[in-house]
Image (spheres, rainbow, N blue to C red):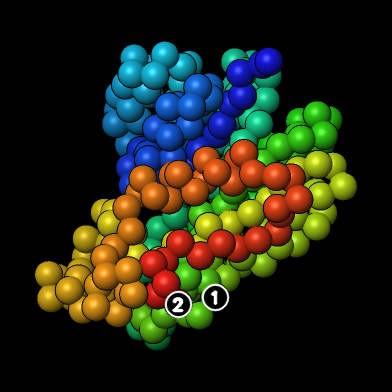
Amino acid sequence: MKQKTAFITGASRGIGRAIAEEFARHGYSLAINCRASGKELESFAAYLTDAFHVPCLPLVGDASEEPFAIGAFQQIENHFGMADVLVNNAGISHIGLLSDMALEEWHKVMDTNLTSMFCCCKHAIPAMVRKKSGTIINISSVWGSVGASCEVAYSASKGGVNAFTKALAKELAPSGITVNAIACGVIDTQMNQCFSEEERRGLCEEIPAGRFGSPTEAARLAYSLANAPSYLTGQVIALDGGWQ
C-alpha cells in the first residue's frame, strides 16, 4: 500500500506542529507549511524525518496567496504524488473593539483564516477527485459558532470556516472525499498566552473539564478524522472540554 501524504498549514508551532508530529508518528509522508518562520520549519522537518523516518517537505510561504498554493501542490505532486490529507490549520486572532480595527487588520485575519483554506482546498481537490478519495480537515473555533466579544473578525472567519466545511462536504461527498472541522475551545498554545494567570484561572473555572486543552489532543482528533469512516463528513466537531 502506498504511503499516504498529509499537507498541514501553520505547522511551525502549536496545534499544527502537534498534528504534523501525530501524522509522522503513524508513518505519513508530510508536507508542512508556515508563512514566515522558515528556519524553524526546516528544523522541524529535519526532526520529523530523523525521529519518525518519514520524508518531510517544508514549504515556506503564504497559503492565502494562490501562486504559492499552486507551487506548493506542484511540489507535493513531484515528491509524493498527491496530498491524501489536507489540514487547514493556518490561523491568527485579533483582539480588540471592532470600531478600533483597521481594514488592513480585518483583511489579514480573513486572508489567513479563510482565504488560505480556499486556496489550499482548490488545489488539493483535483487530485483527490481523480483518486476518488481524500480527507480535508479544517481547524476552527468554538467562537465560529457562538461569537466572542472583542474578537469579531476572528469569530466571523471561523464561522466562515464552519459554513465552508459543511458546503464543501456536500460538494465532494459524491467523489468519496470527506470534509470536517474541529472547533477548538481554549487550547494551550502561544495564541492563548496573552491571558494573565488570573484570566487563565477564570477560564478554567468556566470549562467543565477544568483545564485548557492540549495541542496533542487536537492532533489526535485530527488523525482520527483522517481515518474515520467515509460516512462521517460535513461535521464541525467541538473539542472544548464541554465549555460551549
Q: Earlier in the sequence, mark 2 or mark 1?
A: 1
Left or right: where 229 falls relative to 210: right
Is residue 142 something that shows in the picture?
Answer: yes
Q: According to the image, label 1 marks what residue?
A: 145
What residue lies at 39% left-to-right and 84% top-to-bottom?
149
> Is the residue marked by circle 2 packed among few (<14), some (14-19), or many (20+) residues within 10 Å?
some
Query: Residue 97: which quarter of the image?
Result: bottom left
Mark carried by residue 80: none
User: Residue 212 at x, y = what percent?
Assistant: 29, 63
Mark carried by residue 244: 2
What residue lies at 37% left-to-right and 40% top-to-bottom?
18
Image quarter hosting the N terminus: top right
User: Residue 5 at x, y = what percent?
Assistant: 59, 26
Left or right: where 72 falls relative to 130: left
Image quarter hosting the C terminus: bottom left
Mark 1: secondary structure? helix
